[in-house]
Amino acid sequence: IEALIERIDAKNCAELFLDCDLIVEGFDRQVDKKMLIETFADKKGVVSACGIAGSDLAGIGSRRIGNCYIVGDFTTDCDQAPLFSHKVTTVANHMSELILCQPGVFHDNTLS
């Protein structure tokens, strides 16, 4: 693991994630999410969130678009509603399940 303090943008994005097989997006701004997904859409796997605000869990789902998996309710933005930990955690749990199901990721089936 290499730690960097650097703003990720369209100019350095591809280079920063060159050695990554899978990218888990955690940006707040839509413009940053879009840039990351567009940069890697046909090159690397990306797991992203969309619609994590509010308190309703019923609308949480996942969609696959090419190599990109997106999890959330796809409607409720942080500008529209406050964040609640139970929803953020639920979305993160869905994301972690998608990550663990990716080819080449270790799982121990003896735990289930």
Image: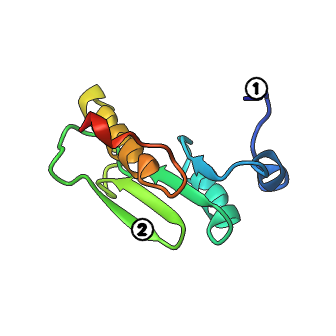
Q: Is residue 76 left or right of residue 34?
A: left
Dot label at residue 81: none
Tell me residue 87's x, y (percent).
27, 36
**Disc 2 or 1, which lies upstream in sequence?**
1
Q: Which residue is mark 1?
A: 3
Location of residue 27 (image quadrant) = top right
**Is disc 2 placed on a helix, strand or loop?**
strand
Q: 112 or 38: which is nearer to us?
A: 112
Q: Residues within 10 Å of mark 1 (few under 14, many from 20)?
A: few
What separation in Å lies between label 2 and label 1 (alpha carbons)? 29 Å
Name the residue located 77 percent from the left edge and 29 percent from the top edge.
2
Q: Position of residue 17 (x, y in %)?
A: 75, 48
Q: Is residue 110 visible?
A: yes
Q: Quadrant of residue 85?
A: top left
What crowding class fits label 2: few (fewer than 14 Cα within 10 Å), some (14-19), or many (20 or more)?
Answer: few
Q: Is residue 81 above or below residue 38?
A: above
Residue 81 appearing in the image: no
For label 2, the residue is 64
Quadrant for the C terminus in the image: top left
The structure residue drawn at horizontal position 41% and vertical position 53%, both measured from the top left corner, is 101
The answer to whether mark 2 and mark 1 are in CB contact below 8 A is: no
Give the residue type that dot 1 points to: Ala
Three-letter amino acid code at the position of disc 2: Arg
Quadrant in the picture for residue 3 = top right
- The residue lying toward the viewer, choosing from 100 and 6, is 100
Residue at the outermost front position: 110
Decide: is 63 above or below 89. Answer: below
